[in-house]
Amino acid sequence: MRSSRSLGLKLVRALAFVAAMVLLAGSQSASAQDRPNVLFILCDDLRWDALSCSGNKYVKTPNIDRLAKEGVHFQNTFCTTSLCSPSRASILSGLYAHAHGVTNNFTEYPAPLPSFPKLLQAAGYETGYIGKWHMGEDNDEKRPGFDYFATHKGQGKYFDTEFNVDGERKVLPGYYTHVVTDLAADWLQRSRTKPFVLMLGHKAPHSFYFPEKKYEHAFDNVDIQYPDTAFKLDDKPAWIKHRLTTWHGIYGPLFEWRKKFPDTRPEAVKDFAAMTRAYWGTILSVDDSVGRLYALLEKSGQLDNTIFVFMGDNGLLNGEHGMVDKRTMHEASIRIPLIVRYPKLVDPAHPKSVSEQVLTVDMAPSLLELCGSQVPAGLHGRSWKRLVQGGDPDWRRSFFYHYNYEKQFPYTPNVRGVRTAAWKYIHYPHGDGKPDRHMGELYHLSADPEERRNLINDPQHAARIKELQAELQRLTVSTGIVEDKMPLDEGVKAELPDQKIR
């Protein structure tokens, strides 16, 4: 049987050929003056519910809210792998991680693989990328598909990061969110004859969380406790309990907000509260950035001809089930914000909310279609243009999720699962082809959106489990996974990850 890796390589080659055909067909695309610009703002580790337009009682995000009030708010958007690099590669390519090959945080986006910026560049767009790229840990060079590129190695720092600004390395003093917004504003104000695509990758709100000075104490008066689901683990797999005192557990170091750990004392919640307040504080600066760029586009007369996208790459567990970080298939980990403002898609006077399941892999085909460019065949995602404008009776009713165990972060096993609007089934293959060694999980999301009750061992749901297992198998095969190769699960471990990759 063919491995998923070999299938992925063949798919990369096939798509590279398709991309070449798209370039040759560029003359058939819409004329440049009729084509919209794209401003794509991508946040790192932003929870779907960390915005006031999503119901957050404490984090007020008026500028992001304005995009939702004038566009379309996708209420149920998910990543297909809850990890930064794989998710970003899926956004760019429209493919699952097993096909684009970026299955961890240390792998480059394959140079020959098409991406929506690369295809739009070839179709006459001027393209730029500013901020956190996060594919290729030690590489800050310009990547294919972009005319302008300003990034840095690794995670970057909230203050005084060294950037490679289109070939010139220099420390840019100041707070990261403002620095990249300054670069974006300068680039947007350049004189140009082509439509543009600009991707702005914020560091925020990725750990370690450091708000700028004016927001350091914005949430000091908010009482924050561990969520009660952190203590309802009796029906959860044992690995979740083992994770409690690790780098990714609520009793661990909490991204260095807790200096002495593990700490299981009730009063140690103060460290969790401090971490959460700092996380929220970084988001306020992102909202300021959105407002500044919105005003710039409005002043220049480009706002209504710009597809303004605001999105997160993956979700974040903040105490749910006793966990922090991401990687798992629980709702807080996989659900992400997505808001799009574009008057030719949705009239600003009549904003929309979409409840169907939309995925990271849908972004590339959607933006290509909205920009009048041909969408390559063979993508795993699909354009949501029809869904937004008139409804799509053929839209997906389920999707599958996968994550591979990482030796550098040994706190989460291999994860494979399927989600529908009403149900979620998760299992944890060991990686050796033998039966799973971890208990699975089954949640009735319609009745239990916080995933409090694991129904996996309830005999009343045996038929449901078989049905979801069959759907998971169908979905994996449909995306080219004939033989699912994955690393061996070496178990949840207590050691901290290397300082350089945190």
Image: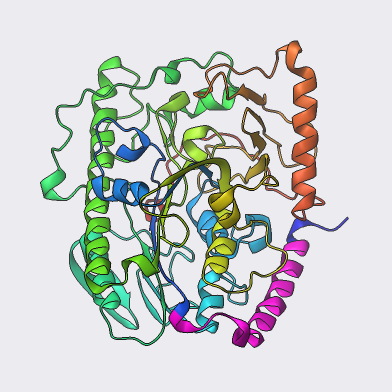
Residue situated in front as seen by the camera: 162 or 226: 226
- Inspect the magenta stretch and tell me whether residue 26 lies in it: yes
Residue situated in front as seen by the camera: 242 or 55: 55
Q: Is residue 472 left or right of residue 35?
A: right
Residue 14 occupies which quadrant of the picture?
bottom right
* In the depicted structure, whether residue 233 falls above or below residue 10: above
Q: Position of residue 169 (x, y in %)?
A: 29, 79
Residue at the spot 55% in from the left edge and 80% down from the top edge: 30
Q: Position of residue 458 (x, y in %)?
A: 70, 12
Residue situated in front as seen by the camera: 155 or 422: 422
Is residue 464 visible in the rendered image? The answer is yes
Q: Position of residue 439 (x, y in %)?
A: 67, 24
How many labels, in total?
Answer: 0
Residue at the spot 38% in from the left edge and 28% down from the top edge: 250
Residue 427 occupies which quadrant of the picture?
top right
Give the residues drawn in magenta, as a range. 6-33
Residue at the spot 53% in from the left edge and 54% down from the top edge: 87
Looking at the image, the residue that sits furthest to the left is 214
| Quarter the N terminus occupies | bottom right
Residue at the spot 60% in from the left edge and 84% down from the top edge: 26
Q: Position of residue 238 (x, y in %)?
A: 58, 22
Query: Which secondary structure dominates the residues rendered in magenta?
Result: helix
Q: Is residue 410 left or right of residue 177?
A: right
Q: Is residue 392 left or right of residue 276?
A: right
* In the depicted structure, whether residue 75 falls above or below residue 7: above
| Colour mapping | rainbow
Is residue 159 visible in the rendered image? The answer is no
Q: Is residue 456 left or right of residue 383?
A: right
